[in-house]
Amino acid sequence: MEKSIKSSSINYGLYLGLFLSTITVLFYAVNLEMLTKWWLGIILFLVILIFGIVSTAKSKSLLGGFISFKQAFSSYFITIAIGFILSTAVSVLLFNVIDPEAAEILKENVIEASRQMMENFGAPQSEIDKAIAEMADQNQFAIGNQLKSVAFQLIFYAVIGLIVALSMKKKDPNVA
């Protein structure tokens, strides 16, 4: 991977991590309950996707409009991975070191939101109780759980990255 596109991907990853971390810290400071809203997840999904696509497009531009599948995927994935790792580090620091009580409040909010959603979908009370008990036993902000979450998110976004790379690749006709 060329140094210029690698550097560009790293920069976009840092911007993404800074954006995600800022959202976490901002909602932590303003209204912790906002971090449990479903629409925030959709907005963040779209922002993450846009960062990955823009990073890939920038790399393609840096290469004169031609990019291989590998270069396109690498550009996308480096951006996403750095963004997630930085954001996760901030979350671990915030909810495990700085304010562990906030993690408990968030956990309670997530449990209540899940209960309401399951009731709205007409889930049987026994299933609701079982799901709530499982959530109550877990610490979603534990470092191990955060690392698992990052791994699953990276796999999910890597699949999307394969599609982005496939759509962005363009072979230089002057190269054999």
Image: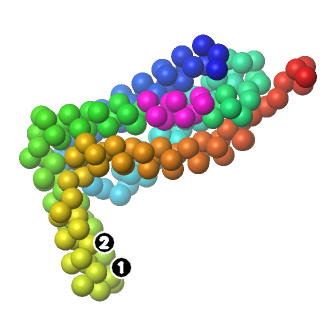
Residue 105 in the figure: left or right of residue 73:
left
Q: Which residue lies under the disc numbered 2?
A: 117
Instruction: Identify the coloring.
Output: rainbow
Q: Is residue 88 above or below residue 62?
A: below
Residue 169 occupies quadrant: top right
Q: Which residue lies under the disc numbered 1?
A: 121
Magenta-drawn segment: 74-82
Q: Are marks 1 and 2 in contact (CB under 8 Å)?
A: yes
Q: Residue 108's spot in the image, x, y percent?
A: 15, 60
Magenta run includes residue 61 = no
Residue type of the residue flagged with mark 2 = Met
Where does the N terminus fall, quadrant-wise? top right
The residue shown at (23%, 38%) is: 92
Q: Is residue 128 above or below residue 51?
A: below
Q: Which sits in the foreground, 137 or 118?
A: 137
Residue 171 in the figure: left or right of residue 69:
right
Q: Residue 136's spot in the image, x, y percent?
A: 17, 64
Residue 175 occupies quadrant: top right
Q: Residues within 10 Å of mark 1 (few under 14, many from 20)?
A: few
The residue shown at (46%, 27%) is: 13
Q: Residue 64's spot in the image, x, y percent?
A: 75, 18
